[in-house]
Amino acid sequence: MGLQARVTLLVVGLVILVQAGWGLSVMRANSNLMRAEAERRGIQMLKALAAPCAVALANREIETLDAILASFTEEDLTGLDLISISILSAEGKVFAHTDPSQYGKQANDPFEETAMISDQQVELRKASSGEPLLLLSMPIVAGLRWGTATAVLSLAPVERQIYQHSRRVLLLSALFSALVGLLLSSLLQRSILRPLDRLTNTAKSIAKGQLDARVPPLERGDEMAMLGDVFNEMVEQVEGQTRVLEGKVAERTYQLRQTNLELQSAVAQLEQLARTDALTGLDNHRAFQEALAFEIDRAQRTGSPLSLMMIDVDHFKSYNDTHGHPGGDRVLRTVGKLLRNQLRSIDRVARYGGEEFVVLLLETDAIQAELVGEKLRIAIEKEKFAGEEVSQPGGRLTISAGLASFPRQATTGEALLDLADAALYRAKHGGRNQVWRDRSRDQ
């Protein structure tokens, strides 16, 4: 065999080896890129889903979770082959699922058990049918962690696309190797190694996430130039799909964030309404009971005193019967406003029921509370109420009040209320228009 033939065989062998290595590198980089892209888009999907689910999951609003999940899965997920999405509570119970039959079940899959305590989790596994699956999880957080969103995606479309692209790369590589084998060894540097280096560098850049990387223009008519064009076309398709998905995810995320803000505002308004007396604008019975329990706990920790005052409008039925319910409502609103204006900002006043009000005086002992009670009584007595001279005994609308203090007289909220109510009874049956406290309990 002559030297020229040996050189030709050597060149062809080297070209085949180099081209095979390049093809494997491109296929590997392309495979990793596509799988990583599927993972990234899946995580973005769960992030977009977790934000609106946080408030609904915290409030156990199952129907809202189902609605969010339904509206989300109706969106075009641009290439993501979604198998299922589930919303798990902090205890691992399924609160929402794309498969309604899964609702209420307890998570027992190792991936789900790990996901409930993980910030973010990704797992690759195969189904019993051999289908490649991608399992993703994302915590659902709104101040506290209320649960976890999980998704199962099929990688079968990605693997098919990888196979198709790999076949194209292999076919083009084989064509390129056959053509280059006919060239002289003097064309090796210009026609093979330099283009190969460009393609390899571009593939590596893309594998690192630089989707805007492209193969520089090669000489026209060269097989490597055709391969570079095909490679660039393939990358442009991947980049285009990614940009479209990012745009849709961003738009959907904005819409869901706006909806979430509206839901939070509505919840806050409902919570405020649930704690406010509609007639007087003061705290209602429920809100006062919560405040009393909280302040008793704090007073027990700090050792500071507090006093509770029960107030009743004297002869209110007489006023109501004479002037009608609208007139009685005006009296209650005025009394509530006067009480609020006479108290400190740290004190709590609420409508307890009917014509009864209750006042919680923080860091105030029994003696100080009695002075405050007298101040409130005098303010009401001096106020001019329409028609009081006709309906009220003595021509003046007045109040009676009963006092009890923590910790000298009682150490629980229930005991304070009982003592204050008993003291109010003494004030009412002792002539009304007075503040009464049981001084025998001061010791």
Image (cartoon, helix red, strand yellow):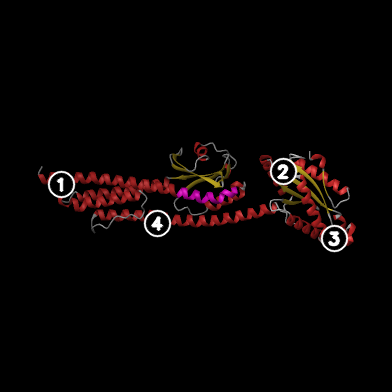
Judging depth in this view, the residue of 128 and 189 nearest the camera is 189
The label nearer to you, 3 versus 2, is 2
Name the residue that disc number 4 marks.
240
Q: Check the picture and name the quadrant holding the N terminus.
A: top left
Callout 2 secondary element: loop
Q: Can the viewer see residue 274 in this picture? A: yes
The mark found on residue 182 in the picture is none
Q: Position of residue 104 (x, y in %)?
A: 60, 41
Disc 1 to disc 3, how far (Cα)?
Answer: 115 Å
Q: Magenta residues: mostly which secondary structure?
A: helix
Callout 4 secondary element: helix
Name the residue that disc number 3 marks.
324
Read off the magenta span: 41-56
The mark found on residue 305 in the picture is 2
Q: Can the viewer see residue 278 in this picture? A: no
Disc 1 to disc 4, how far (Cα)?
Answer: 42 Å
Judge left or right: residue 286 versus residue 61.
right
Q: Position of residue 7 (x, y in %)?
A: 14, 45
Name the residue that disc number 1 marks.
8
For marks 2 and 1, the one nearer the N-term is 1
- Callout 1 amino acid: Thr
- Callout 4 amino acid: Gly
For marks 4 and 3, the one nearer the N-term is 4
Report crowding for label 3: few under 14, some 14 to 19, many 20 or more residues within 10 A (C-alpha): few
Disc 4 to disc 2, how far (Cα)?
Answer: 69 Å
45 inside magenta stretch: yes
Disc 4 to disc 3, how far (Cα)?
Answer: 73 Å
Judge left or right: residue 386 versus residue 57.
right
- Callout 2 amino acid: Pro
Judging depth in this view, the residue of 127 and 208 nearest the camera is 208
Judging depth in this view, the residue of 38 and 264 nearest the camera is 264
69 inside magenta stretch: no
